[in-house]
Amino acid sequence: MFTPKIIIDILADNVRKTRNPFGLKKSGLNSWWKDSSVTQEGDTLLFTGMMYQLVPYIKATTKYLEKFEDTPKADYLRYGKVVPKALTNLALNIIAAKEDKQSFNAILANVVQILQASGVSFSYQPELDEYSGVLLYDLGDQESFVEHAVYVANKLKKAGIRKLITVDPHTTYAVKVLYPKYTGISFEVQTYFELANLKGADSATEVTLHDPCFYGRYLELADVPLTLLAGLGVNCKPLNTSGSFTTCCGGPAESVSPKLAEEVGLRRVTELKDNGGKIVAMCPICMANLQKAGAEVEDLSSLLVKFAG
């Protein structure tokens, strides 16, 4: 295991200086929308929170962390704060797989198609879309989280944004629960799948849904995708460890201990595989960690977009 404070200090420093935990330039990190037809005006904003965009960099970084965990070289990580951000940006863009970037960007394009097919009026304004800061909160750096959350919330409020449409559980929990509590600024927040209004009758597809911790336990949204898929004729196989009893994918631990994250992920993959059916996730962190543990996983949006034609 790495020393948590070293990891937290590096992430907080990156967020403070670049507004994302990896010190990446936003122009390079967030480019999925450039081929999109979505409007860039309005008070309802598709807010990605940069989570899907960040996963390729998380995957690439974790591979290196695995090599150094519990070795003398782990201590060198403390010097991460003094590495120039431009150099960090260049290195991460080199090691992050192009295929991963394309794959996770495609998921966001799917979300747009689902919302448009559902008749939802919304905008995407890339200058307003920011990382939520939720990992800082998860790791216990409340001061840095609040500092960043205040910046993001005020930016959205100043731009006249009233409603946020989110795409992942971490960002949803941050802007729906944490932002009102710590910034005093509230928005109407709904996930894209809560707004999906699709039609279909695909009785041939059988899936096992993996509920992320935030959707299953804290936001109590696990029934929404189940109901949505059932209405589309998709057979969702019952799973004991779901909803409020869902089992973690292990992903949130990988910044501190990749080994622990892998151990937890392997247990979850066994549960999901034993249940049968195609495994479907609705969180980029869950998806990446379950794949790493040996599962074939499809994102919920990739399944729903088939009914958006």
Image (cartoon, rainbow, N blue to C red):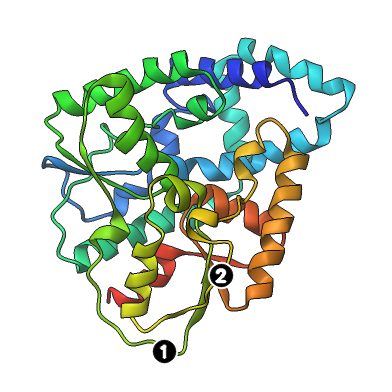
Residue 188: mark in rendering: none
Taking the spot 21% from the left edge, 68% from the top edge, the residue there is 117
* Residue 60 point in image, percent of width and height: 65, 41
- Residue situated in front as seen by the camera: 231 or 163: 231
226 horizontally vs 139: left or right = left
Mark 2 or 1, which is nearer the eye?
2
Which residue carries the number 2 mark?
Answer: 239
250 horizontally vs 233: left or right = right
Q: Which amino acid does label 2 sit on?
A: Leu
Tags 2 and 1 in contact by the CB under 8 Å rule? no
- Residue situated in front as seen by the camera: 90 or 113: 113
Query: Which residue is situated farthest in the top direction here?
Result: 82
Q: Is mark 1 on a helix, strand or loop?
A: loop
* Residue 100 point in image, percent of width and height: 56, 52
Quarter of the image with the N terminus is top right
Query: Which residue is situated farthest in the right direction here?
Result: 72
- Residue situated in front as seen by the camera: 91 or 217: 217
The Cα atoms of the two marked residues, 2 and 1, are separated by 19 Å
Q: Compared with residue 145, is residue 167 higher up or lower down, i.e. above or below?
A: below
* Residue 212 at least partly seen: yes
* Residue 99 at least partly seen: no
Number of numbered markers: 2
Q: Compared with residue 155, is residue 95 higher up or lower down, i.e. above or below?
A: below
Q: Which amino acid does label 1 sit on?
A: Ser
Residue 94 in which image quadrant: top right
Which residue carries the number 1 mark?
Answer: 203
Q: Is mark 2 on a helix, strand or loop?
A: loop
Q: Residues within 10 Å of mark 2 (few under 14, many from 20)?
A: some
